[in-house]
Each structure stands twice: as C-alpha cells, then as structure tokens.
Amino acid sequence: MMRKALLAAALTVTAFAAQADYKCSVTPRDDVILNPQTVQVKGENGNLVISPDGSVMFNGKQYNLSASQREQAKDYQTDLRNALPWIDDGSRSRVEKGRTALDKIITQQVGADSKMRSRLTQLDAQLKEQLNKIIEHRTDGLTFHYQAIDQVRANGQQLVNQAMGGILQDSINEMGAQAVTKGGNPLQSVLGNLGGLQTAVQNEWKNQEKDFQQFGKDVCQRVITLEDSRKALVSGLK
C-alpha cells in the first residue's frame, strides 16, 4: 500500500493524458514549448507556432488569418499557457503531499530518527527530477516532452520499488531493535508494528486517492479540450 501511494504520486505528472489508474481517450503526440515570444506545438501532428498577437505559422508557412481565426489562435495559446503550469504545479504538489504524509506516519510509528525518513526524502528528490523530464523548467518558460512519458513512468516504478525495498528492511531492523530493548517477543512485536504501519499508510492513501483520481480526470479533460482546439485551428488553415 505504501508503494501504491508513492507510485501514484510519481505517476501523476506522466498522466498529461492519464493519471495513475485513470485512462484518457487522448494521448499527447506533440511537444509543447512555452516562451514569452511564442507557443510551439511540435511533433507527430506537425509544427505549429503561435505568436502573442495570434499570428500562426504551420510547418514553416505563415498564414493569413481572419479576425475569428486570430482570436481562435489567441485562445488556444492562452489555454496552453494556463494548462501546462497547472498540470505541473498540481503534480508536484501531490508528490509533496504524499511525501509529507508518509514522513509523518514514519515519525509517529517508528521515530523521528528513522532512516526511512532520509530514504523518503531521497526518493522525493528523484521523483521530482523525473517530473522535470516531462515538464521541463527552463529559464524562459516550460517545455512538455511527450516522448518522455513512458520512460519516466518506467523510471518512477523502478525508483519506488528500490526505495520500498530499503524502507521495508529499515523498518524491520528499527522495529526489531526497539522490540529487543522493550523485552517480550521481538518477532511478534515487529509483525504487530509493521501491521500498524501498513494500516496507517492504507488509511492515508484512502484519504488521498479521490484527489489523485479527480486530478487525473481533470487533466484528461483539459488534454481533450486542447487537442480539439488544435485540430479546429489547424483544419481552418488554408
């Protein structure tokens, strides 16, 4: 259950099209590059560049637009500029929320000096580094890399699995040491403490699961809307 909670947090940003267990009908096929001068959507669907005034270049050709087409391009550009930071901030905040909750559980259940806390901090940094491979923070803006999704998903799974192995071993060692100092049956005490830790994590995951799922649905809806807007804009270019 702890692995599931961490992995869901790790995969949130990879769900530009699908969050964790939520499947979306649209999968991104283009990079999105935001900077103050332009918005660029480039990939399997061609190369679309939009300027702040609504001017459009598609596959290297500058188009003469009607007033309504120019407004359409401006709206699409604005939606992209709003959506990408929203997805990035929402994903990172949920990773942080998951880390904070698990850290609190470990502190309460095992102790403030537990090695598990440092492993969790290291995992948090590694996961956020993975997030930046999908939505890259540049000095002049953000870039969404659609081809990074599958690799980051695999990397996130591997990082979480490795961390969980270390956390489980730490929990057995630390709870075992505590049991010995308290006397009684060490094995029985360790199993009881592990059960308590698992229950606490399971309860916390239940608290956060609906938020993760709703965020995934909201991300999916934005992606669908953005893709519909892109298709409508491109189809009108002549």
Image (spheres, grey):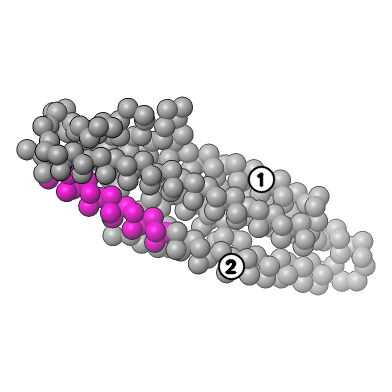
- Identify the residue position indicated by label 2 in the image: 207
Q: CA distance from mark 2 to mark 1?
A: 21 Å
Depth check: 166 or 16 in front?
A: 16
Q: Is residue 90 above or below residue 135?
A: below
Q: Residue at x 41, y 35 (%)?
A: 142
What's the magenta region?
216-235
Could you say which quadrant of the image residue 49 lies in?
top left
Residue furthest front in the image: 67
> Identity of the amino acid at label 2?
Asn
Return the residue nearer the eye: 173 or 209: 209
Disc sitting over residue 145 in the figure: none
Q: Earlier in the sequence, mark 2 or mark 1?
A: 1
Which residue: 57% across, 42% down?
A: 126
Q: Is residue 199 left or right of residue 215?
A: right
Which residue corresponds to the image point at 57% horizontal and 56% vertical from the top-left?
6
Q: How many marks?
A: 2
Q: Position of residue 151 (x, y in %)?
A: 42, 44
Q: Nearer the viewer, residue 166 or 30?
A: 30
The circle on residue 121 is 1
In the rendered view, would you say 168 is above or below 64? below
Q: Is residue 61 left or right of residue 105?
A: left
Asked if the residue at tag 1 contacts the one at tag 2, i.e. Cβ–Cβ closer than 8 Å, the answer is: no
Instruction: Tell me, yes or no, if residue 180 can be seen here.
Output: yes
